[in-house]
Image: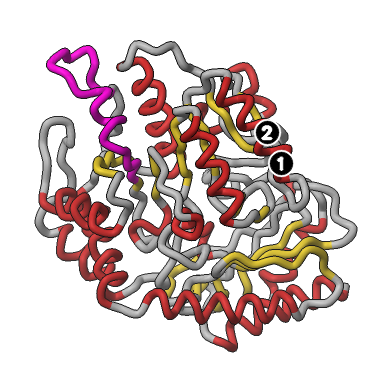
Amino acid sequence: MSSPVWHPFTQHGLGEPIPLIARAEGAFLYGADGGRTIDAISSWWVTTHGHCHPRIMAAIAEQAQKLDQLIFAGWTHEPAETLAAGLRAIMPEALTRVFFSDSGSTSVEVALKMALGFWAGRNEPRHRIVVMEHSYHGDTIGAMSVGARGVFNRAYEPLLFDVETVPFPAAGAEQAAFDALDRACRADAAAFIVEPLVLGAGGMLMYPPAVLAEMRAICARHGVLFIADEVMTAWGRTGTLLACEQAGVVPDILCLSKGLTGGALPLAVTMASEPVFAAHYSDDRARMFFHSSSYTANPIACAAANANLAIWREEPVPERIAALAARQAARISGLAGVGNARTCGTIAACDLAGAEGYLSDVAPRLMALAREAGVLLRPLGDTVYVMPPYCIDEPALDAVYAVIAEAVGG
């Protein structure tokens, strides 16, 4: 019998190889067979400063000797308090409350429940969630419900709730998206949830900050809550700490995960404005916010996140991000034979000719080619993207783009 492990987003019936990785450092993964692989996608977009960053690893080791786990319902601990204060110091001033969870999908579930709880607490019957075409917010039921419908979730359709969908604001078609959002908001929508600037799993679709600003303004005019899902786009991926910064936008609710711990451990937060918190604040226990998970605000994960915040405070992280963004832009624009080459901060993407959607066989062929060349890539159907840790060096980045160029040429 083969390994009993059931891997995510993997069709085991194809018999594709699953490499065994023994350790990692910086932008590199080291296999049990002694081979080295360049992590060109930050191990599913989580690793920011590099694998096994010494400051983050030291914080984890130190905290593991003090407090490993604590119920967070009615109890607290120093790593969580420090992290909440640290987030308040660098995130928009209006986001006054920090609710901990343990994954990007869960942070979205929390945001949706906060939004509905807000209107319930005000005794206003608003239940409709507005979403953007091609969006992706996670794989739990609520997160799937507010994401694009398709091969990802077709089998689970009976479990998903209805949403109002507005078109993706493609260049030249922005007004159609604005008009649809305005109509949905006028119909007493509860909230609009969006991936700011870049729709990740939808194909690294990008739109400009001015569009994000206008969508926020439409929601504000109608009193509709604005939820920014920055699980992927935060922590410098789009060039700034938050993608929302580039549009001058402050959401009512903000979802963060992935790079929150530098990618070292699972942790998420949902930050909310004071009115959202106030709608749940009461001396009536029936009006509390009914959500938790066993590992809410795990102390070791919080310690890793605090080390990440220290790196942002004390090291030239913005400069590293700017340098990588420039290197990405130069390389993706220099690729021949690809379509729609595009960048947003440290994210670079292009479309491959001849591929047909997410299940195209072009993607697994490129993955196999890259794996043989010692590069971890995972195309989104006909879209190939590069999203490496900020520490990747020039030779490694050259090797990544050499693989893509070879694939295009072949």
Vertical position of residue 365 compared to residue 123: above or below: below
Say left or right for 82 vs 226: left
x and y, in percent, of residue 390 in the image: 47, 74
Instruction: Decide: few, some or many residues near mark 2? Use Cα within 10 Å; few <14, some 14-19, many ≥20.
Output: some
| Pointer 2 residue | 179
Is 169 inside the magenta-drawn segment?
no
Q: Which residues are magenta?
A: 269-289
Q: Residue furthest front?
A: 221
Vertical position of residue 315 compared to residue 186: above or below: below
Choose between 404 and 235: the one closer to the eye.
235
Vertical position of residue 236 compared to residue 233: above or below: below
x and y, in percent, of residue 52 in the image: 36, 71
| Pointer 1 residue | 175
* Badge 2 amino acid: Asp
Vertical position of residue 184 compared to residue 122: above or below: below
Q: Please say whether residue 298 is visible from this viewpoint.
A: yes
* Badge 1 amino acid: Gln
- Number of callouts: 2
Query: What residue appears at the point 40 percent right and 60 percent down from the top-left corner?
Result: 263
Q: Are marks 1 and 2 in contact (CB under 8 Å)?
A: yes
Gap between marks 1 and 2 measured at Cα: 6 Å
Element on which disc 2 rests: helix
Q: Which quarter of the rendering shows the N terminus?
A: top right
